[in-house]
Structures are given as structure tokens and as C-alpha cells.
Image: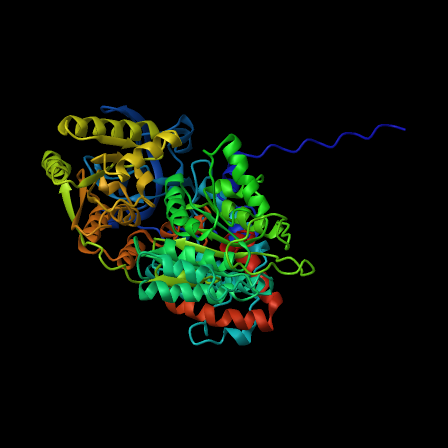
């Protein structure tokens, strides 16, 4: 029997194909939704004599001269002459021999570019051109210019999109009866809208295309917002079907004893959000709540009270923070509050090694440790929980989507032994564990915390599946923070202010920027600043803290600063969150123009934590961009985190503000949350009807617009 011939090897992909894959243009629908950046009008010809300087026009004529000249640099000069005898010079400063050949004398060319007044008459520099005949028809529609790359020519992309547009599944999936909302009535069908946007007719108003106000754009934006809302609300409904342990604090139990032991009174806002969280925990469905509050508003104690409810009910709690400094800050506060009440708190980070690490792992797995605090090390495979009922993720936006999804899957897949391990110590007055015959919980409750307030429009969109609790007041006794903006030329003056502050017994932060592209440069910058301040303040201890230091050295530096022995701390942004030194009343942020608004606000929140008036100095190096000026002006004008967030949204836009939900992919490509608020409201109203009455249409809408990205919206 003859051997079967081997399958032919797959043909290697061309450079344009690879470039399309890199842009995510994999399906016909992806290409159909890849919309033009702008349009070129190739539907009409302008006689050369009528073209005005500065206009971008299309002209046509015969090549009457073609030569290479050396006028300071080598350049190709091609001269066209039209039927009226007017001439136009085409100047190419960079060219290939093939281009010179394609514009040989005697050929007829159609060229498009900006008209300039040159020394030898009118000219175009590097125009687009193509060979035509006298009867070659003009384009019937405006020519789209797409987002592309160097390896993806516009001509190739235009052909691919035109072909995909014919094949793409663009049938209407939305029931016509549900498209009769006042804002959606009269919008064109999806296929018609896309065909119009890819190939608008010559008489289309370019202004409405460019500002996205055309009905075709409105239809696309509504479709996108509807898909996003459907995904969020569907996730919310799916979560409501899951089971979770109903966690209730026992009368006179840990929760009440913690409240009584705290050395301060909760603010009204803290009491309100703590009650909202307690009500969620008492339900047999998993809580999925975002706790947001400004810097210093007291989120940690609210998380501690939530943990106390879980522990009261006999379940463990895990708290995960993005950095060791922040995790350790939480750990120290929590053991101070809970260990006197007989609650064991475990500490798990990457720097805990050997026997100490194994001891913590055993404590978590056996249930001896009822509260486990750490970094992303908490979600490693080796970390097992006995009875995990609540997970708290602090600064949740700092974790990637993959990490948060891994945490959810880890929690969902845990084997929750409902009877307590033999010999595991019980906290005082802890209720008995549920009977072993009960079904295990499918998913623990989840509380996410953020010190970056989310504006309402973003919360409605990016967190539509989350309940949101907001701490909107600061604890009493906090000192006001005055923000001053200075040019770097006044650096010596700032150093004199630092010297005066430390003589008065105050402590100072000096923050150097972190530029991810050049970690070595960052370190050099921080090190040189440390040397400069050490020389200027010879009688004071000046410390240095940066991300490349071993954890033990970081801890030693922070201990000296927190204890008051160190007067000045030079640091990169590792101190952005979690550092609480009430005696620190002056912060200098170097190259403040390089930071985002929310990051500047987070850094500024490290001072003003005591009773002494505090100052934050923003040092900038000019010239400042308009964005840089807007950021620094906002910082000087307000200390309200919610106002800062609103201005940050105005400056950066929702995608960058949210980090595109930290997925690395823009989830809203067409809609603008501020301009399109009416469309967002309509999408929110229509989504429940679609889910209830037309579930198949809802699923098709989500798949068309989000595909695999829907999971990122749930994380």
C-alpha cells in the first residue's frame, strides 16, 4: 500500500498578514469594524491653475520632465502639465529607482497632496500618485485612510476591508420593536451604517464624520455600548445564581469587639459603607463590591470590619495588595487591631522564604490563620485555604486582569472543607462551623478597594456589574495640604525649605519619577538626588528607597523613616500607596509633569496624615505641554480626589484613565462616555429587556462586539 503523501506545508504569512494579526484584524467582523481615521477626497479633479496654496487637492496631467538634482541633497523632481498648460512640480526628497521609473516622461499621473508656492512655481512635496489614462474614472466615494502600520499598506488594507465587509455577518440581531427608543429611532441598520462610514459619498458632510455625530456613527456607538452593558449585566445575573456562604456577625462577637477596641470613631461614611458590605455578606450570593474612597479616607478599617464579619461566621479572609510596602502597611494595622482579639493573621509575600513561609502556608491551609495578608503570592498554587469566605483586593486597578481572573478561578475551585480542621484554634465566641452535609460554597465574596475615585459615568460603564460603596469624607484631624508648583530652576530654594522643615522636627519625602523604559536611568536619578540632599543636609539621615532594593533593605529603610530616625526619604513611586507617617509634612515631587493626575494625587496623600499643615511641591522641567500644564493646574487648585478623577478623565479619556479595564485592549473604541451619555443611558435601559425577552439576540450582540474580551469586563 503506497504511503500517503505528506500534507503540504502551510504557506508562510506575508508581512501585511502578520501586521493585520498584530492589529487584531482576524475575523471579517474585525475588519468591518476597523473604521477610517480620516478620508481623502479623490472624487474630483482641481485644475492646477485653480489650486490655492495650502489646499490639499487632486490634480492630473502628463509628465513632461523627470530628473534627479543635487540641491544640497539628492532629490527627484517631476513636472506635470495639464490640458490648460499649467505646470506642477512634484518634489521627492526620499525615493526609490522604481518610483522614478513609475513617473516616466509621457505618462499620465493623478496626484494628490498639499499645494505649496515654490521657487519654480507651484509644487507638491511627496504627493500620492498613480498612473491613469484619459478615461480613468474618478472615485465614486471618499477614500478611507485607516489606522495601519509600516508593514500594512493602505491599498492592501482597503482591499481586505472591502472584501470582508461583503462577507461579515452584519445582519440585524436587535429586534426592531426594541429599537424604537427616542434616541435610536431613525438610526440606520448596522450594515448600512458601516458601508457608509467605509465609503461615504462625495456629498457627505466631513464634519459629521470627523466629530462622530453622523447617524451612522451614532448607530455604531450605541451598538458598542449596548454590547458592553449586556456583558456587564449578564455577568451580574450569572453571579447572582452562584452560591456563597451567608456571613453574619454574631451578637457580641468579633465584629462588635473590634469596633469597641478601635482607638478612633468611624466617620459617618465609614459606618454607612461598612453596613452596605455587611448586608451583602449576609446574602447567600457572592458579593462583588467596589469600595472607593479618597486617599486617607479609612478604607483599611472598613476592610478589617468586613473580615471580622467573615471570621465571626467561621470563615477565612484573604487580603491581597499590589506591593509589599502596601501589603505590610495593611498587615501591621490588622495585627494591631485583631491579634489582641485572638485572631491569627498570616503574612505571605514573595520575600517570605523557607520555614517561615511554610509555617504561614500551613496556618492558611489548616484554618489556624483566619486572615491571610500578602501580595500576588497569595494566589500561587501552593497557597491553600481551609475555608475562604471573603477575598479583599486593594488597589485592584494595579492588578492585571489575568491575575484577578486567576484569583477568581482559584477561589471557585477551592475545596472548602466545611468542618473545621481538628485542633484548629477558634477565636473567642466564634459560632460553630456549618454542618459537613451542606454543599460547599461555589465562590467566596469579593471586595475590591480603590483610592482612585471612579467618576459616575465610568462606574456605570466599566463597573456596571459591581455594587459601589463610596467613602466621601475624611477622618477628622487631618491637616490641609497646600500644593505649590515650581520650576526646577528653584531647586536650591526648595532644598533650603527642606532644611528648615527638618530643623523643626518634620520629615520629608522627595519623589523621583519612574520611567519604565529606563529603570537604570530612574535609579541613577534617585541616587544622584539622594547624594545631593545628603551633601546639603550633613547633620540629617537621608534615606533611599527604590524598586530594585531587596525587600529586607526596603523594610529597614521604611522602619527608620516611620520611626522618626530618618529625616528625608528619597524614593521612586514605590511609596505611592500604603505609607503612613503622620510626622511627614513636606513632599517634593521631581519632574511632576511626567506623572498622571491620579498618581500625583496618590503621592500627595502620603503627607497631611497628621495634625500639622502640610505642603506638596511639584517641581517641573519646562517647556510644559498643554496636558502637563492642565495636570499641574488641577493639582494646585483642588485636593478633592473625586474632582481630580473628573479632571483626569477629561485630560486622558476613559480608556487611559481605566487602563482599558487593565486588559491592554481598548474595550470602548467608538463611544465617548461624556459625549455619549444619552446613548449609554439608552443602552442601560434596553439591556435588561434584551436579556429577558431575547437572550439569543443578546448573546449574538456580545459576541459580535466583544468576542473573548467579555471576560475582561467581569474581572
Farthest right residue in view: 1
Give residue 390's position: percent from left, percent from top. Answer: 51, 55
Do we see residue 657 in this rendering?
yes
Quadrant of the rendered image containing residue 434 = bottom right
Foreground residue among 621 and 183: 621
Residue 161 vs 247, above or below: the answer is above
Foreground residue among 150 and 440: 440
Give residue 424's position: percent from left, percent from top. Answer: 58, 48
Side of 561 relative to 303 (left or right)? left
Q: Quadrant of the N terminus?
A: top right
Side of 136 relative to 536 (left or right)? right
Foreground residue among 31 and 435: 435
Residue 86 vs 273, above or below: the answer is above
Give residue 168's position: percent from left, percent from top. Answer: 58, 55
At x 49% / y 76%, what residue is drawn?
180
Side of 675 relative to 704 (left or right)? left
Give residue 373's position: percent from left, percent from top. Answer: 46, 45
Tell me which colouring the rendered structure shows: rainbow
Residue 93 vs 406, above or below: the answer is above
Quadrant of the rendered image containing residue 702 = bottom right
Do we see residue 104 in this rendering?
no
User: Number of numbered discs present?
Assistant: 0
Foreground residue among 67 and 201: 201
Side of 6 relative to 549 (left or right)? right
Amino acid at each position: 500500500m503506497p504511503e500517503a503523501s505528506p500534507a503540504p506545508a502551510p504557506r508562510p504569512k506575508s508581512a501585511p498578514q502578520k501586521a493585520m494579526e498584530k492589529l487584531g484584524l482576524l475575523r471579517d467582523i474585525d475588519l468591518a469594524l476597523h473604521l477610517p481615521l480620516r478620508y481623502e477626497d479623490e472624487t474630483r479633479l482641481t485644475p492646477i491653475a485653480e489650486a490655492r496654496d495650502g489646499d490639499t487637492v487632486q490634480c492630473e496631467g502628463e509628465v513632461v520632465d523627470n530628473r534627479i538634482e543635487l540641491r544640497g541633497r539628492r532629490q527627484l523632481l517631476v513636472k506635470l502639465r495639464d490640458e490648460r498648460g499649467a505646470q506642477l512640480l512634484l518634489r521627492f526628497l526620499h525615493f526609490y529607482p522604481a518610483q522614478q521609473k513609475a513617473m516616466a516622461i509621457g505618462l499620465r499621473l493623478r496626484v494628490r497632496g498639499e499645494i505649496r508656492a515654490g521657487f519654480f512655481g507651484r509644487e507638491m512635496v511627496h504627493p500620492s500618485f498613480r498612473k491613469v489614462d484619459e478615461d480613468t474614472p474618478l472615485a465614486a466615494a471618499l477614500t478611507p485612510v485607516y489606522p495601519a502600520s509600516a508593514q500594512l499598506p493602505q491599498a492592501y488594507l482597503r482591499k481586505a476591508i472591502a472584501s470582508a465587509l461583503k462577507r461579515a455577518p452584519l445582519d440585524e440581531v436587535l429586534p426592531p420593536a426594541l429599537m424604537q427608543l427616542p434616541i435610536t429611532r431613525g438610526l440606520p441598520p448596522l450594515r448600512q451604517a458601516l458601508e457608509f462610514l467605509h465609503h461615504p459619498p462625495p456629498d457627505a458632510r466631513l464634519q459629521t464624520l470627523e466629530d462622530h455625530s453622523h447617524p451612522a456613527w451614532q448607530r455604531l456607538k450605541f451598538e458598542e455600548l449596548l454590547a458592553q452593558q449586556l456583558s456587564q449585566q449578564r455577568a451580574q445575573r450569572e453571579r447572582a445564581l452562584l452560591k456563597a456562604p451567608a456571613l453574619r456577625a454574631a451578637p457580641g462577637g468579633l465584629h462588635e469587639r473590634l469596633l469597641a477596641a478601635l482607638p478612633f470613631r468611624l466617620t459617618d461614611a465609614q459606618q454607612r459603607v461598612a453596613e452596605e458590605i455587611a448586608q451583602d455578606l449576609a446574602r447567600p450570593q457572592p458579593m462583588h463590591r467596589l469600595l472607593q474612597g479618597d486617599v486617607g479616607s479609612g478604607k483599611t478599617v472598613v476592610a478589617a470590619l468586613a473580615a471580622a464579619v467573615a471570621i465571626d461566621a467561621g470563615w477565612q479572609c484573604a487580603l491581597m495588595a499590589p506591593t509589599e510596602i502596601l501589603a505590610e502597611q495593611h498587615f501591621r494595622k490588622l495585627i494591631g487591631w485583631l491579634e489582641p482579639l485572638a485572631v491569627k493573621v498570616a503574612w505571605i509575600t514573595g520575600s517570605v522564604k523557607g520555614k517561615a513561609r511554610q509555617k504561614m502556608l500551613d496556618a492558611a491551609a489548616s484554618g489556624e490563620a483566619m486572615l491571610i495578608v500578602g501580595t500576588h503570592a497569595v494566589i500561587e498554587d501552593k497557597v491553600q485555604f481551609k475555608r475562604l469566605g471573603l477575598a479583599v483586593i486593594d488597589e485592584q486597578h494595579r492588578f492585571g486582569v489575568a491575575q484577578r481572573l486567576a484569583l477568581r478561578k482559584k477561589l471557585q475551585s477551592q475545596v472548602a472543607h466545611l468542618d473545621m480542621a481538628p485542633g484548629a484554634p477558634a477565636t473567642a465566641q466564634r459560632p460553630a462551623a456549618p454542618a459537613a452535609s451542606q454543599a460547599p460554597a461555589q465562590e467566596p465574596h469579593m471586595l475590591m478597594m480603590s483610592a482612585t475615585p471612579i467618576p459616575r459615568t465610568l462606574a456605570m460603564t466599566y463597573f456596571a456589574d459591581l455594587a459601589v460603596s463610596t467613602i466621601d469624607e475624611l477622618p477628622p484631624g487631618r491637616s490641609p495640604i497646600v500644593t505649590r508648583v515650581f520650576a526646577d530652576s528653584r531647586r536650591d530654594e526648595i532644598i533650603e525649605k527642606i532644611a528648615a522643615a527638618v530643623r523643626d522636627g518634620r520629615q520629608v519625602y522627595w519623589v523621583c519619577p519612574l520611567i519604565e523604559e529606563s529603570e537604570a536611568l530612574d535609579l541613577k536619578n534617585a541616587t544622584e538626588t539622594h547624594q545631593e540632599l545628603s551633601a546639603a543636609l550633613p547633620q540629617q539621615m537621608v534615606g533611599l528607597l527604590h524598586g530594585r532594593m531587596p525587600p529586607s533593605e526596603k523594610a529597614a529603610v521604611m522602619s527608620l523613616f516611620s520611626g522618626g530616625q530618618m529625616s528625608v526619604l528619597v524614593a521612586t513611586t514605590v511609596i505611592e500607596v500604603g505609607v503612613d507617617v503622620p510626622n511627614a509634612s513636606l513632599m517634593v515631587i521631581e519632574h511632576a509633569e511626567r506623572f498622571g493626575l491620579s498618581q500625583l494625587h496618590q503621592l500627595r496623600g502620603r503627607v497631611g496624615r497628621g495634625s500639622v499643615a502640610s505642603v506638596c511641591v511639584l517641581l517641573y522641567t519646562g517647556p510644559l505641554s498643554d496636558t502637563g500644564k492642565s495636570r499641574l493646574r488641577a493639582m494646585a487648585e483642588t485636593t478633592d480626589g473625586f474632582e481630580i478623577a473628573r479632571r483626569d478623565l477629561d485630560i486622558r479619556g476613559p480608556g487611559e484613565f481605566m487602563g482599558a479595564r487593565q486588559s491592554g485592549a481598548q474595550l470602548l473604541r467608538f463611544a465617548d462616555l461624556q459625549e455619549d451619555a444619552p446613548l449609554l443611558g439608552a443602552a442601560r435601559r434596553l439591556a435588561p429587556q434584551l436579556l429577558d425577552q431575547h437572550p439569543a439576540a443578546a448573546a449574538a450582540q456580545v459576541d459580535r462586539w466583544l468576542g473573548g474580551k467579555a471576560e475582561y469586563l467581569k474581572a
